[in-house]
């Protein structure tokens, strides 16, 4: 990459930023930075937007990629929901929708749902005159992003080696990128929150449990494409069977589904709980109702969340002892959005109990507040490819 491309790449990764930040990063004097940025503005590649918070003196203008450079259609397919969005080149969401997909049981059903969702997004894009450059999909389960094959999806058993990239490119004639959803979200975290971390963990706690690793400031990707399977770390040797074929995996005792099933199991066997006053039927039981009952000191729900949090804390402390991260970013539906977080308290307690002292004191645990992380993660690969293949080569020609 030439200097201008490197500057542009850095603007993308760190935007919005000021010219003085560029000058510091590249050791260039401000006059040269000015010339380069003006060039990029003249070509319509970057724009000014807003001002940096002032540290005295004149406020510095912020620079970011021009949102009109390109648009992307992105889907995040988790075990129970399909989120879809149109985003611009800064991964800012223009439109967003979400649907629950727990009723879909067959590969063909999910495929048709994906096709329909993309067609709908295309229509939305047309209405707003957006030019869709690429499609980005992040999907739970094993994914080979190189070949674009979704190898396995946790809940749908006939979903085996689905060549999602080529199926979508054939149907929509738009270049498509596929990634595992945790890997994709870790990219989004690295981008906006963990810019200065050399070693960090991103942990997602929800219907599935997974972790992404940032090593030497970069998102780690296994050459075999499969890593971060925190959910399949064994935490209870005599525990229940997991869909992966092992027993006692973290996911089988502490995922969103496992927690709700455990509460249901005890209720069906006559356990007393205030949750019965709050729902009409057991079908209404979900992680939020369990969290609310536990906050009202319901003993069954409290115990179930506390136990799950203990297993999660144990699993995470094993990763801490192995990698020594500076920061752990925690995200997902198991983290309560309001009130006391009983599960998270148990997670923290067990991390401090099981991780080596020196590490336990040195890292920070941060709850991710941005709900858009998974969608921004799905947008990472398509935006990166578009920048490298289209925008950077245009600069070369200029
Ligand atoms: Zn497992």
Image (tube, helix red, strand yellow):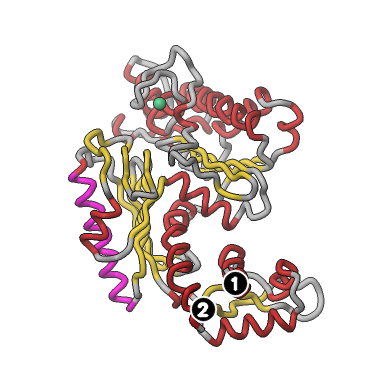
Ligand 1 placement by image quarter:
top left
Tell whether 348 sits left or right of 382.
right
Residue 13 in the image: above or below residue 374: below
Seen at 27% across and 40% down, the residue is: 161
Is residue 192 at all visible to an observer of this figure?
yes
Please state the horizontal and vertical placement of residue 310, each as a whole percent of the image. Answer: 56, 24
Are dots 1 and 2 in contact, CB under 8 Å? yes
Residue at the extreme right: 56
Seen at 54% across and 28% down, the residue is: 312
Residue at the extreme bottom: 42
Could you tell me which secondary element the residue under label 2 belongs to? helix
Residue 374 in the image: above or below residue 294: below
Q: Which residues are magenta?
A: 108-129
The residue carrying mark 1 is 2
| Residue 119: in magenta span | yes
Tell whether 127 sits left or right of 367.
left
The residue carrying mark 2 is 395
Magenta stretch secondary structure, dominant: helix
Residue at the extreme top: 238
């Amino acid at each position: 990459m030439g200097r201008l491309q490197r500057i542009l790449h850095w603007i993308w990764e760190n935007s919005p930023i000021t010219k003085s930040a560029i000058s510091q990063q590249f050791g260039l004097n401000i006059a040269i930075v000015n010339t380069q940025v003006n060039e990029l503005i003249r070509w319509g590649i970057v724009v000014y937007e807003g001002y940096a918070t002032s540290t005295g003196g004149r406020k510095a203008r912020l620079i970011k990629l021009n949102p009109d450079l390109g648009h992307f259609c992105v889907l995040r397919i988790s075990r129970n929901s399909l989120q879809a969005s149109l985003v611009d080149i800064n991964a800012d969401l223009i439109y967003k929708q979400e649907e629950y997909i727990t009723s879909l049981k067959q590969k063909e059903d999910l495929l048709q749902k994906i096709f329909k969702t993309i067609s709908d997004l295309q229509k939305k894009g047309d209405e707003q005159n957006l030019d869709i450059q690429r499609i980005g999909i992040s999907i739970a389960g094993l994914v080979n992003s190189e070949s674009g094959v979704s190898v396995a999806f946790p809940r749908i058993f006939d979903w085996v080696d689905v060549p999602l990239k080529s199926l979508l490119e054939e149907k929509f004639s738009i270049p498509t990128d596929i990634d595992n959803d945790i890997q994709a979200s870790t990219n989004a975290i690295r981008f906006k929150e963990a810019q200065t971390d050399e070693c960090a963990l991103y942990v997602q706690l929800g219907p599935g449990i997974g972790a992404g690793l940032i090593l030497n400031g970069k998102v780690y990707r296994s050459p075999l494409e499969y890593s971060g399977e925190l959910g399949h770390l064994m935490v209870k040797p005599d525990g229940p069977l997991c869909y992966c074929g092992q027993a006692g995996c973290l996911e089988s005792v502490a995922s969103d589904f496992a927690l709700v099933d455990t509460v249901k199991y005890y209720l069906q066997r006559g356990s007393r709980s205030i949750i019965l006053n709050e729902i009409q039927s057991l079908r209404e039981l979900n992680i939020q109702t369990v969290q609310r009952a536990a906050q009202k000191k319901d003993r069954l729900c409290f115990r179930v969340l506390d136990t799950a949090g203990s297993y999660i804390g144990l699993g995470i402390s094993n990763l801490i002892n192995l990698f020594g991260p500076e920061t752990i970013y925690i995200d997902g539906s198991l983290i309560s959005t309001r009130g006391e977080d009983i599960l998270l308290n148990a997670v923290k307690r067990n991390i401090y109990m099981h991780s080596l002292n020196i590490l336990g004191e040195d890292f920070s645990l941060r709850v991710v507040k941005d709900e858009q992380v998974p969608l921004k993660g799905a947008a990472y690969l398509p935006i990166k490819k578009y920048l490298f293949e289209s925008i950077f080569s245009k600069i070369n020609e200029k």
